[in-house]
Amino acid sequence: MDFFSSLIYPFEWLVSWILYGWHTLFTAIGLDAASGGAWVLSIVGLVVVMRAAMIPLFVKQIHASRRMQLIQPEMQKIQAKYKGKTDPDSRQAMTQETMDLYKRTGTNPFSSCLPILLQSPFFFGLFRVLNGLEKIATGEIDPIGPITPEVAAQAEQSTFLGAQLSDKFIGADTVTTQVVALLLIILMSATTFTTQRQLMMKNMPASALDNPFAKQQKVLLYLMPIFFAISGVNFPIGVLIYWTVTNVWSMCQQFYVIRRMPAPGSPAEKALQERRRKRGKPVEEFTVKGLDAAPGEESDTTQKTSGQRQQPKRNKKRKGQPRPSGGAAPKPSNPDS
């Protein structure tokens, strides 16, 4: 077993148990154990388990994205300050100021990548499980968790719209398999495009769309579906189902988030504020603690939104000093008198 296989095997094992658990459940409620419907629903169940487990990370991703939007003006100030300076000291100073900005605003730029990074090993695990069904069934490779040769043979022979779950567009024996694979690839690419376009058109402020990063995002908006379409011809039908269902989940989840928790300054936020005004509800704005404040200081934004009243400070009395009578202030003593 090579290094990559050793690294992915725990995820293969976990994926196989989740699939087997859902398949057992659907079989118990009356579905045929050898039917494609039971195995397709098991793949859908795998998506539900995976995405439900990542909801806390997704919430962190939302807050991180909103913070990143709000600190963009400060980021641009730092970049303008060191523009054209390529010496090591200037680069180090710019990095340090950027990290200080992240620290005092509680922003983690990597939080937005966590759901994708954590989902990738499970995707590869499912790919390897489905890709190895035939070899497990024939005994060429060892079983993976509960996927014994008998279970693997049952899953490998199951079909979805006439195509076996382990079949691919490349090397397919029937036209039916190619048609099903092509339809799933189109759905997978279309849902990917729709999700990304929804994010850029509705949940990004105008200022964020006019920078090099946004231009790269626009290019990726069209390149990613093409990439998935090209690579999808090598994916088993079961993996295409998994990816399409995952994209549909992401699209619906993102629609809810954009409507309820939009990015600051975006068209979606303006629409939310307008809906709240029509309903007579207060308009709330998302703020970031520490923004526009020097390190170690609180920003005006934090003080306005904290809701805590600052207590007045009292001057400490000097020991041994008599208290003035009648409210008159004590006169300073003159040593020359």
Image (cartoon, grey):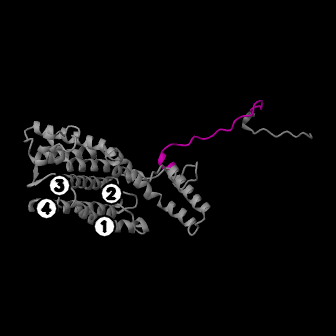
Q: Mark on residue 284?
A: none
Disc 2 from disc 1: Cα separation: 31 Å
Residue drawn at the location 75% of the way across and 38% of the way down? 328
Residue indicated by mark 4: 178
* Three-letter amino acid code at the position of disc 4: Gln
Report the front residue among 305 and 320: 305
Disc 2 from disc 3: Cα separation: 40 Å
Instruction: Sort mark 3 into few (<14), some (14-19) or many (20+) by Cα contacts within 10 Å.
Output: many
Residue indicated by mark 1: 223
User: What is the quadrant of the N terminus in the image?
Assistant: top left
Q: Is residue 312 above or below residue 262?
A: above
Disc 4 from disc 3: Cα separation: 10 Å
Residue depth check, mark 4 versus mark 2: number of the one nearer the observer? 4
Image location of residue 95, percent across then percent down = 55, 57
Disc 1 from disc 4: Cα separation: 23 Å
User: What is the quadrant of the C terminus in the image?
Assistant: top right
Name the secondary structure under disc 4. helix
* Three-letter amino acid code at the position of disc 3: Ile
Q: Which residues are magenta?
A: 302-323
Residue depth check, mark 1 versus mark 3: number of the one nearer the observer? 3
Tag count: 4
Residue drawn at the location 13% of the way across and 48% of the way down? 156
Residue indicated by mark 2: 272
Name the secondary structure under disc 2. helix
Residue indicated by mark 3: 237
* Three-letter amino acid code at the position of disc 1: Leu
Instruction: Sort mark 1 into few (<14), some (14-19) or many (20+) by Cα contacts within 10 Å.
Output: few
Q: Is residue 148 visible?
A: yes
| Magenta stretch: includes residue 89 | no
